[in-house]
Amino acid sequence: MTIKQEIPQSNADELAKYKDLLDKGIISQEEFDAKKKQLLGL
């Protein structure tokens, strides 16, 4: 069973950019997590 969260495409794109920055070591895991919470409204 797949649970699909409704995430606006722009937020998903934004999150992908931040994930890329995280993977490159440009931002920290904490910064990524904070941005993710903000984008997802958690």
Image (spheres, helix red, strand yellow):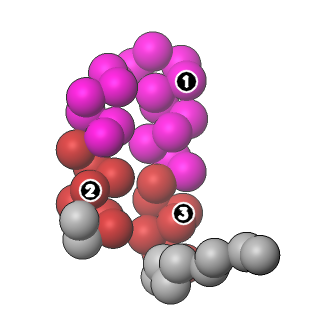
- Distance (Cα) linking label 1 and label 2: 18 Å
**Residue 4, image x, y percentages:** 62, 79
Q: Secondary structure at mark 2?
A: helix
The C terminus lies in which quarter of the figure?
bottom left
- Distance (Cα) linking label 3 and label 2: 14 Å
The N terminus lies in which quarter of the figure?
bottom right
Residue furthest front in the image: 1
Residue furthest top in the image: 25
Task: Identify which residue is drawn at 46% across, 27% down.
Answer: 22
**Residue 31, image x, y percentages:** 25, 33
Which segment is the magenta one?
16-33
Task: Identify which residue is drawn at 55% across, 24% down.
Answer: 23
Question: Do residues under tags 1 and 2 come within 8 Å of each other at their CB atoms?
Answer: no
Question: Do residues under tags 3 and 2 come within 8 Å of each other at their CB atoms?
Answer: no
Q: Residues within 10 Å of mark 2 (few under 14, many from 20)?
A: few
Residue furthest right in the image: 1
Q: Label 3: which residue?
A: 13
Q: Label 1: which residue?
A: 23
Task: Identify which residue is drawn at 24% across, 71% down.
Answer: 41
**Residue 37, image x, y percentages:** 26, 56
* Left or right of 10 on screen, residue 30: left
Q: Label 2: which residue?
A: 37
Identify which residue, 20 or 38, lies in the foreground.
38
Q: Residues within 10 Å of mark 1 (few under 14, many from 20)?
A: few
Residue 23, placed above or below residue 35 = above
Q: For the residue marked with disc 2, what is the amino acid? A: Lys
Q: Secondary structure at mark 3?
A: helix
Q: Secondary structure at mark 1?
A: helix
Earlier along the polypeptide chain: callout 3 or callout 1?
Answer: 3
